[in-house]
Structure formats: structure tokens, C-alpha cells
Amino acid sequence: MDKIIQHLKHSDHILIASHTNPDGDAIGSSLAIGLALEGLGKKVTFYAESPIPAVYRFLPEIDRMTDKIEANNPFDTAIILDCGDISRVGDAVSMIQQIPTIINIDHHITNTKFGNYSLIETSACATAEIVYRLIKKMKAPIDKTIAMSLYTGIMTDTGSFRFSNTNRDSFAICEEMVAIGVNPYRIAQQVYGTYSLGRIKLLNRAIDSIEISENGKLSVMTITKEMFDETNTKPDDIDGLINYAKRIEDVKVAALIFEQWKNNRKDGARKTYHVSLRSEETVDVGAIATFFGGGGHTNAAGFSIESTLAGIKATLLDLANKL
Ligand code: 5GP
Ligand code: MN
């Protein structure tokens, strides 16, 4: 951390980036570190390749996030947050790799330790927790906007202080953010209480799609493009759905498969599937996701795969026999 702070003291224009399909931690930790560095007089550009989900648009400085970056690459430093590997930032990866110094801040156990400096704390409940400590150590002021961003990152990544990554610091930091002026009800209301009707209808279909392995230990939820089309929803409306599949008694691993369409210059639109995995404490789904080219945490992980729905389901059900 000290080396990172030393480096940042001398940097001038910093690019802040996180992963595609950003969640509350990706967004919260990015805004918090960028705004804190601005408070210390640095020039900052916030990059997010995917659109920001509607439920996070209440964050005061969210409009600073853009999918366009200066073409002449004026940055001396990039800070990459909440990304297990650098390709998670999306198509801008090749441009980002040209930036002279890359700082990797993350809490995923599968982190590849890319970049010139890495600050990886796998016991942190959220990347926002690590960012909090970095901001404190830099002696940057925490205003209400930064406090809301950190609070949102921790609240969402701990599933509102329910998941196994919830620790003392989750509460201590959030308590401090509330003292600064964060209103817990208002943030929870924005994140969990402003769903579109389509999202609720998608929930209905997602729950209906649940299949259970013969031994009852694995549940699979499937979301197809038709379900998105029929309910007028997008992949960012999936956030949290997998938890319903995980709540079923005896289920040790829950999987959510959804269709992803990516525009590829060479082949046009190309279909892949994203598989999210959640497990109870005793099963390491991070290792399973890594095996399939993805990554994540011990109890929450994911990967993308080019296959058929039937093929993916067969693979998952085969896995269930080993649980
Ligand atoms: P989710 O299932 O919500 O997409 O992701 C669960 C966790 O796994 C998150 O912490 C996320 O960053 C990580 N994850 C999901 N997909 C991938 C992937 O394709 N590659 C890597 N490295 N991590 C992923
Ligand atoms: Mn995170």
C-alpha cells in the first residue's frame, strides 16, 4: 500500500476502471477512489464499458463514468478495481495495457496479480473496504458522496451484511459512513426498492426455470434471450436472482446460466453463456470457475463459455454428483 501511495503522489492523470456488467462494488469502489484522488488535486477519468445499472444511478457523481476515453491515452497511471484479471475491464484492455503504470486493487482469491502494483486482500468483504483503507492512509477527505459510494460497495457485496464475507470492518466502515451522513434506508431503497415491473416479471420466470439435480445438492436457474425480450429487461436486471436458487434446502451449489450476446467485429453478434455460481461455505466454486476460464471468490464466482444450454447443464449436473 505504501508503494502505491508513493506512486500516486507523483501521478498526474489517472484512469479508473472496473469490470464489465458492473455491480455495486465495482461502481462504488471506482467512484470512491477516483473522487478521493481528485480531492488530493489529481486529474481523474472514470471508465466503465457497460451501461451503469439503473439502481446505481442515484450515486451523485455517477455521470462521471463514461465508456469513452481520451484517444491519445494521456494517462500515466490506471487503477483497476474489483477485477480478478485485467481482461475483465472489457474491450479497452489493450489500450489500458499501454498505460505506463497499472495498479490492481481487488479482493478476489483468483486474482492473477496483474499490473505493476497490486493490493489484493482476499479477506476484504468488498474492494470498497480496501479502497477505504487506502483513502484513509492517503489522508484524503471522505465527503458524503465518497461515503455513499463506499457504503454501497460494501452493502451490495455482502448481500446487505448476510454473506460469509461480512466481517467486523464491514460494519465499522459502514458505521463511519453513516456518521458522515449516509442514510442506510435511502441507499437500500434505491438499490433494492426501485426495480422495474419487467424485472419482477423476470424474477417470476427465473424462479420458474429452476431445476434441481437428482441428489438435490445443485440448483440451476436459466435465463434466455426470450425471457429478457418478453420482460423488456437486460443482463443487469439479473443481479441477485441467483440467491433464490441458493435458498433451497439441501442445495450446496446454485448456478445461474444466462445468454450473452457480444458484438464481435469479425463474426458479428456471437452468443456465449455466462454462468454464475454460489455455494455454501464448504464448496469452493472459485476453483470450479477458474477451471472454466473465469474466477471469483470461494463462495461466489463465474465464467463465460461458448457451448449449448444442454451441454452446460449436463456439465453442471455431472458436478452435482461430486458434491
Ligand atoms: P457473478 O456471478 O455475480 O457474475 O460474479 C460472482 C463473482 O465472480 C464476482 O466477484 C465476479 O467478479 C466473479 N466473476 C464472474 N464472472 C467472472 C469471469 O468471467 N472471470 C472472473 N475472473 N471472475 C468472474
Ligand atoms: Mn467485489
Image (spheres, rainbow, N blue to C red):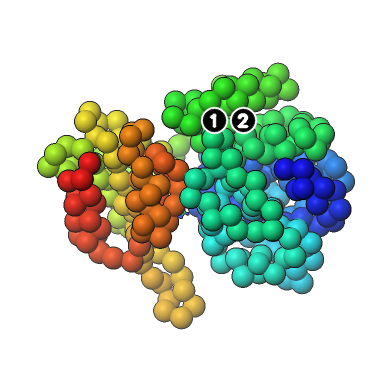
User: Amino acid under label 2?
Assistant: Tyr
Inspect this view and state whether residue 233 appears.
no
The quarter holding residue 246 reads top left
Q: Report x, y in % for residue 283.
A: 32, 39
Within 8 Å: ligand 2 and the Cβ of disc 1?
no
On-image quarter of the C terminus: top left
Residue denoted by label 1 = 155
In this view, the residue in front, 87 or 53, is: 87
Horizontal arrangement in the rendering, residue 48 relative to residue 8 (left or right): left
Compared with 308, 181 (above or below) is above
Whether label 1 touches label 2, CB < 8 Å: yes
Compared with 187, 113 (above or below) is below
User: Amino acid under label 1?
Assistant: Met
How crowded is the residue under tag 2: few (<14 C-alpha within 10 Å), some, or many (20+)?
many
Compared with 122, 180 (above or below) is above
On-image quarter of the N terminus: top right
Inspect this view and state whether residue 10 appears.
yes
Question: Residue drawn at (20%, 45%), measured in percent from left and top?
Answer: 322
Residue sitting farthest toward the left? 214
Question: Residue drawn at (27%, 49%), measured in percent from left and top?
Answer: 222
Residue sitting farthest toward the bottom? 266
- As helix, strand or loop, the secondary structure at mark 2 comes to helix
Q: Report x, y in % for residue 312.
A: 25, 58
Residue denoted by label 2 = 151
Q: Report x, y in % for residue 25.
A: 57, 40
Q: Report x, y in % for residue 230.
A: 32, 52
Question: Residue drawn at (53%, 51%), measured in percent from left and top?
Answer: 111
Horizontal arrangement in the rendering, residue 320 relative to residue 103 (left or right): left
- As helix, strand or loop, the secondary structure at mark 1 comes to helix
